[in-house]
Image: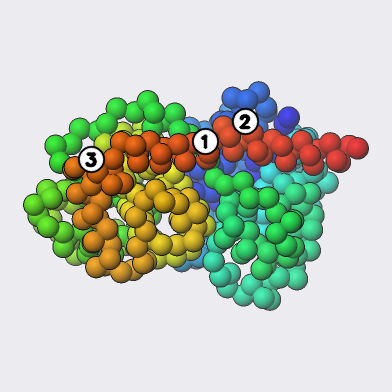
């Protein structure tokens, strides 16, 4: 099938939705389909797929406690409509279909459309947006969501009930972790991966980590960057056990994750799924994360969940996880790590792509039936 995958967010910036769009395109191509990716582009796109269609440059827009890079105005919408007319896809797959920008123009097209809702949490002005959002969402032939939390958020804004949405989940390219050689490190490591902004809880993690028993001898690797980076680096300057990695590529991230004893996701809220947790389980690292509904659905019983924003509870969780890792006990026992990796396998991007193909085929053949 020829599938047009549309991202409303700039593909030049790292992000959960963009990563899913690009990885899904690779999985669909490997399965013999013809994916084409459309989205805003502001510079180089890591592992850009062949035939990538740029819909223009983006601007930063505050959203969900973070910053979204959206292509606003009539030009991106016109480019999207023209691209679809030229490509003539069997199905158009819109990620965050109600996000402002080119997805709106795509919704007005006649091709069968699948929408995937990623966002979880309260939508500002959602009650006032609901009537228009419901009319736009009615143009979707199928609605999917990455989690129950994302589905609930979509229902609150776009209408419908549970039977109108299929929860598929996010996908992870697991082979990256199976083939990665561990990054050299003489000490046990706690790894953080994410944008440095208040919602991700990095400040909470730093406070918790810096209060750990020094006898554990652990190092904290901090990957990523963001608006809070400079302030946090000043606050914790002089800590030789904290290494600021900046933005790392996929290969380095896989190597560091495989080497890490613990992967910590201390987000304060607004998380619908938690791809990094799947990656951590696939890499056989112990997961310590905030007790958010989206995270709990991914981790299950295969990690330590602590109240979000609670420095003392997070410190206790990190202490336990590091001691388990050094002794090969508890969550770090080989059998426990194997069980976590088996759980992660259900979110293999190959499996997720196959679930989407089922949806694509259903809406495509229904449109020609």
Residue at 71% across / 70% down in the picture? 130
- Report the front residue among 240 and 143: 143
Q: Do we see residue 361 in this rendering?
A: yes
**Label 1 neighbour load within 10 Å: few <14, some 14-19, many 20+:** many
Marker disc for residue 214? none
Label 3's element? loop
Q: Position of residue 110 (x, y in %)?
A: 83, 46
Q: Which residue is mark 2?
A: 28
Q: Residue furthest left?
A: 215
Residue at 28% across / 43% down in the picture? 332
Q: Earlier in the sequence, mark 3 or mark 2?
A: 2
Q: Earlier in the sequence, mark 3 or mark 1?
A: 3
Label 1's element? loop
* Whole-number angstrom distance, CA of label 2 to CA of label 1: 13 Å
**Label 2 neighbour load within 10 Å: few <14, some 14-19, many 20+:** many
Q: Is residue 207 left or right of residue 175?
A: left
Q: Which residue is mark 3?
A: 328
Looking at the image, what colour scheme do you see?
Answer: rainbow
Q: Is residue 357 left or right of residue 221?
A: right
In the rendered image, the quadrant that contains the C terminus is top right
């Amino acid at each position: 099938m020829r599938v047009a995958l549309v991202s409303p967010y700039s593909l030049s910036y790292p992000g959960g939705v963009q990563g899913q769009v690009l990885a899904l395109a690779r999985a669909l191509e490997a399965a013999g389909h013809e994916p084409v990716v459309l989205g805003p582009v502001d510079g180089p796109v890591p592992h850009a797929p062949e035939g990538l269609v740029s819909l223009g440059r983006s601007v930063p827009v505050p959203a969900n406690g973070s910053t979204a890079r959206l292509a606003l105005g009539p030009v991106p919408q016109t480019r999207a409509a023209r691209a679809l007319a030229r490509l003539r896809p069997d199905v158009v797959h819109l990620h965050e279909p109600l996000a402002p920008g080119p997805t709106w123009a795509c919704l007005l097209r006649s091709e069968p459309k699948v929408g995937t809702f990623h966002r979880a949490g309260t939508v500002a002005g959602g009650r006032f947006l609901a009537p228009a959002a419901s009319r736009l969402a009615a143009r979707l032939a199928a609605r999917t969501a990455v989690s129950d939390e994302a589905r609930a958020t979509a229902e609150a804004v776009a209408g419908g009930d549970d039977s109108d949405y299929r929860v598929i989940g996010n996908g992870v390219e697991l082979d990256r972790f199976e083939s990665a050689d561990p990054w050299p490190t003489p000490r046990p490591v706690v790894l953080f991966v994410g944008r440095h902004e208040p919602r991700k809880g990095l400040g909470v993690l730093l406070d918790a980590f810096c209060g750990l028993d020094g006898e554990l001898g652990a190092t904290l690797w901090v990957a990523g960057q963001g608006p809070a980076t400079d302030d946090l680096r000043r606050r914790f300057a002089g800590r030789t056990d904290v290494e600021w990695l900046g933005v790392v590529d996929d290969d380095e991230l896989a190597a560091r994750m495989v080497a890490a004893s613990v992967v910590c996701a201390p987000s304060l809220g607004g998380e619908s799924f938690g791809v990094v947790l799947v990656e951590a389980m696939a890499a056989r690292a112990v997961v310590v994360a905030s007790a958010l509904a989206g995270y709990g659905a991914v981790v299950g019983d295969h990690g330590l969940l602590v109240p979000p924003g609670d420095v003392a509870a997070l410190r206790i969780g990190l202490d336990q996880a590091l001691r388990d890792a050094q002794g090969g006990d508890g969550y770090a026992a080989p059998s426990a790590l194997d069980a976590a990796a088996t759980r992660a396998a259900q979110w293999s991007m190959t499996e997720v792509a196959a679930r989407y193909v089922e949806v694509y085929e259903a809406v495509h053949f229904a449109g020609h039936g």
